[in-house]
Amino acid sequence: MSIEKKATRLVPAPSYGLLPERDVNARPVLEARNLGIEFGGLHAVEDFNLVIGKTEIAGLIGPNGAGKTTVFNLLTKVYQPTMGTILVNGRDTVGMTTAQASKMGIARTFQNIRLFSNMSVEDNVRIGLHNQIRYGMFTGIFRLPAYWKCEQRMHERSMELLSIFDMQDLADHKAGSLPYGAQRRLEIVRALATNPCLLLLDEPAAGMNPHETEELMENIVKIRDSFKIAILLIEHDMKLVMGICEGICVLNYGKIIAKGTPEDIQNNPTVIEAYLGKRKEA
Amino acid sequence: MKKRNKRMTDKLITFGIVIVAFIFCQIMISTGNMSRSLRGQLIPICVYIVMAVSLNLTVGISGELSLGHAGFMSVGAFSGIIAAMWMHKGIGVENQVLCLIFAIVAGGIFAGIAGVLIGIPVLRLRGDYLAIVTLAFGEIIRNVMNCIYISLDGQSLHFGFVNPNLPGKLLLNGPAGTTGIVKMSTFPMAFALVLLTLLVVLNLIDSRNGRAIMAIRDSRIAAESVGLQVTRYKMMAFVTSAVLAGMAGAIYGLNFSTVTAAKFKFDTSILVLVFVVMGGIGNIRGSVIAATLLTVLPELLRAFSDFRMLFYAILLILVMLVGNNPTLRSMVLRIIPRRKNQSQDGEVN
């Protein structure tokens, strides 16, 4: 609610985009400008500039400890940035809480899965729908007609969402008892339930076998096409990143060292150096 | 939909048990088969069921260890007594049921206000710190109650803090507690409160808001990331629990001719917590059963006279040990196949 009341400011953006030619006139979904955070004296992320257009699949890669997850935590307001601006659909998100950022349309999954593990699969998705389908506390306690109507709608919608990954049959299982891959998929479904415009995936393919990864790649593209949302993903599996990302951003020691299409990145000497080290001169 | 039905049956079983127990008690009373001491226990049993179920909402469902639950009971008891006495003697309403209902509502409202006031600072804390601060608040409420004097003069109430010289007749006499209460609590009313509590808590858990409360318990960060306002839902659970405890307190207070603040000390909070832990944290039906058995138990152990509380403690320890014994558990699981599936689910994670 309070977000609506706040004065929005549209800021003309110089193109920091991964694929600037693609969304040249459209307002980007996400725009991070000079974003940075300092922990004590440590610059975990510094001067981070990124623009993601509507329906773009972008990748964020980098060696371990480069600050990728920190960027996600900044974008979702788990950490408040100490420098720079984040604009979501042109609106400044300064001072917002994680919950407010979610209402702005940023959804995420976690590197180490954070499901509501004691609750059923369907309830996990229903919690994602929490801000979409609402009724009050008294309606819930005294089971007024609105309760039944909303619960029915929630049930239908969550089944629809679970069907993306063919998980309808698992709806009654406890989320914590699902196999690892299914838990990762459920996290994505839960994030999608919040009706986002930008989905942040933190290592979606971690712990998956090549076959599952293949399936996941297809599904990510499918999600983008059917929900018309932008996706930013952190991933170490280069096959997945190079396979589906349209733009890639490489992070090392909290700084962007390269941006571009997968081909650019593969041939970029700085990136190769960051990952493999310098070739010794003979 | 299958699971929806299972939840419904679970709920109906809980209500069924309580209602059957109530009818059984009523038959026993009317045929004169119930001993005097047990009959005196009926209202406290109902009160403690409400206390245990409401504390389970905080401890089990919301996942915050609260050690000051007796404080809310105390606020409810005193405000309920004053409200009932004012209505009965001040305004002159003869109908005691009406006075009692008014007292319950007043007790709930005042305990709810106390819950909001305490919740604002307390719910910023987590884990052990929260437990310690709730403990402190429970003690603060008790000590404040020891200093309050309230008198009834005609239709008007007079309040005094550390000052007993008030016009009219004293209703609340500081550390000496309330005096001259008309005992209004009846077993059917206490039972109705049990039903109301079960309805509120069970339906709350199985609704949008209850799911949010449980989600925050399971993973605070994930809950925030899907847009839940953590403080709001913690507050909802905490205040609901306080309101129910206040209502229970009102019935409890009007069951005795004198009530002192010392009745609602730390021990009472712990006693209710014991009910919750024995019945299973997060298990509402368990709380009902544990509260009933453990309230009756000291009476049944009267035969051991001085060693009564010793046996009570030993029994508690035994139940805990037996409940966690893997051999016994597997035996029970073999008998009840439905639970077996659930436990296998548990083993996977």
Image (cartoon, coloured by chain):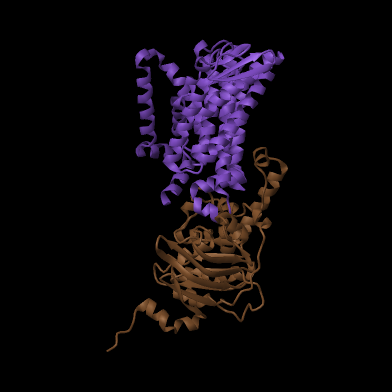
x, y percent for residue B86: 66, 17
User: As drawn, is B78 to the left or to the right of B88?
Assistant: left
The residue nearer to you, when weighing B228 against A48, is A48
The residue nearer to you, when weighing B36 against B110, is B110
The residue nearer to you, when weighing B9 against B97, is B97
User: As drawn, is B321 to the left or to the right of B75?
Assistant: left
Q: How many marks?
A: 0
x, y percent for residue A148: 69, 45
Instruction: Please tell me in which quadrant of the rendered image residue A10 appears.
Output: bottom right
Check the image and report above or below for B115 versus A19.
above
Chain in brown?
Answer: A
x, y percent for residue B37: 50, 12
Residue at horizontal 50 percent and vertical 46 percent from the top: B217
x, y percent for residue B207: 62, 44
Check the image and report above or below for A266 versus B149.
below
Residue at horizontal 44 percent and vertical 37 percent from the top: B131
- Residue B16 visible in rendering: yes
Q: Residue farthest to the bottom?
A: A282
- Residue B95 visible in rendering: no
Residue at horizontal 55 percent and vertical 43 percent from the top: B234
Instruction: Please tell me in which quadrant of the rendered image residue A237 appears.
Output: bottom left
The residue nearer to you, when weighing B163 against B14, is B163
Q: Residue farthest to the left?
A: A282
Check the image and report above or below for A124 versus B88.
below
Chain in purple?
Answer: B
Check the image and report above or below for A21 versus B346.
below
Residue at horizontal 58 percent and vertical 11 percent from the top: B180
